[in-house]
Amino acid sequence: MLEFLQPINYEDIKKPNKEWAGFQLGKHIHFNDGDTAFDVEDYKIAIIGIEEDRSSTDNHGCGKGINHIRTELYELYVHFDMPKIIDLGDIKNGKTVKDSQIALKEILKHLLEKKVTTIIIGGGHDLTYGQYMAYENSLHKAEMVIVDEKIDILETEVVNSSSFLWHIINHEPSFLQNCTHLGHQVFYNNPKSVDILESLNFEALRLGEVRKDILEIEPFLRSADMLSMDLSCIKSSECPANAVTSPNGFLGEEACQISRYAGFSNKISSFGLYEMNPYFDTNNQGAKQASQILWYFIEGFSGRREDFPSEDNQNFMHYIVRLESADNEIGFWKSNFSNRWWMEMPQGNSEEKIYIPCSYSDYQTALKDELPDKWMRAYARLAE
């Protein structure tokens, strides 16, 4: 694994003539300096950078933002129980973009096997493809959440930041269980892009739908294995560090909330933050925004607890809702610890049940004698 990585040079990530204070994040990070031996299994989170931006359409230069983000991130103060974190350094650019994708895949695959949650600082959004490919031989199919103003599903021969989702969906053999796309702005997207996702029973929630009640997206992150965020999803006045950013988009605090939900999820094992371009940044505002998004992921991670429904778990309330219109009943579970909700789904002829993350509003929908949309989409995917 280490042969793919360029160790950290402290001078590249510290502010001039300034040391980190005791409560700043940088003081609590172990750095791969290329000389000190370490065992990656000793850490809960690994941070890796990747400069690859040759396939970032219309935002070339985003690979140069990695250390700008690190500098701002390690200046932030810790207000939680700090998980053990190692910064492994940067993935060296391969001879081709495909080589870089393979390097990312192999490093992340190794970290997943060691049960180390990984933060990826990119680079182009097309690196999502390498992030996803690391899950190829997992015991279960992968679920992913993408946050972006555009649905990058353009049909092209090569993987780039406008087409990586098309290549993920059409990869054979398929190991994609579900994809949720959050925050697309309809005027930037071909209607066919949305149609493709919905035809596969995937969710594609436009910006206004997510912002209406951002708590409603938490269940999608709770069920995901990976999160990929393009910084262009944030409105340009709050994060100018992108060549194609829009005057509309998420507020910075909304992006941080999404990241915190992801950190708190017991299932998410990788988070890729892509497309921060320092050549378009103003007063390091984009780097600061990116660093705060990552801070919230780490803060959420520090609050992870075993919280999953089962018949003998006394920390859960169990509700049964009978739907007359569907001649069916749905079991709902609510955690007394986190107030999060799940709903039951039968698994064919098996007596075992699948528990689908949901929200209180899904329970309310069922009380109105309607099948929740999350339940129907999940059932359709499982029936395929």
Image (tube, grey):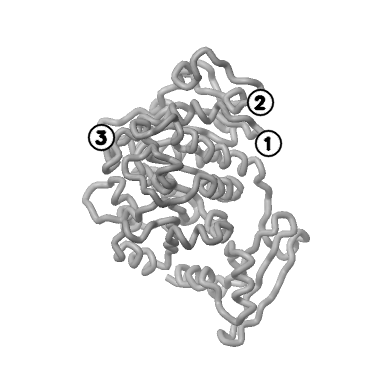
Going by the numbered disc 1, the residue's amino acid type is: Phe
| Residue 194: quadrant of the picture | bottom left
Residue at the image point whose x is 40% and y is 38% from the top: 106
Label 3 crowding class (10 Å Cα cut-off): few <14, some 14-19, many 20+? few
SS assignment at label 1: loop
Give the Cα distance between marks 3 and 1: 41 Å
Label 2 crowding class (10 Å Cα cut-off): few <14, some 14-19, many 20+? few
355 w.r.t. 283: above or below:
below
Residue at the image point whose x is 49% and y is 59% from the top: 210
Q: How far from the left and from the top, in percent, is residue 68? A: 44, 28
Q: How many numbered discs sit on the rendered protein?
A: 3
Q: Disc 1 designates what residue?
A: 80
SS assignment at label 3: loop
Can you tell which mark lies on residue 23?
Answer: 2
SS assignment at label 2: loop
Identify the image quadrant of the C terminus.
Answer: bottom left
Label 2 or label 3, whichever comes before in sequence order: 2
Task: Give the foreground label among 3 and 1.
Answer: 1
Label 3 or label 1, whichever comes before in sequence order: 1
Q: Is residue 106 left or right of residue 76?
A: left
Label 2 or label 1, whichever comes before in sequence order: 2
Label 1 crowding class (10 Å Cα cut-off): few <14, some 14-19, many 20+? few
Going by the numbered disc 2, the residue's amino acid type is: Phe
Residue at the image point whose x is 66% and y is 22% from the top: 22
Residue at the image point whose x is 25% and y is 34% from the top: 96
Task: Give the foreground label among 2 and 3.
Answer: 2
Give the Cα distance between marks 2 and 1: 10 Å
Going by the numbered disc 3, the residue's amino acid type is: Thr
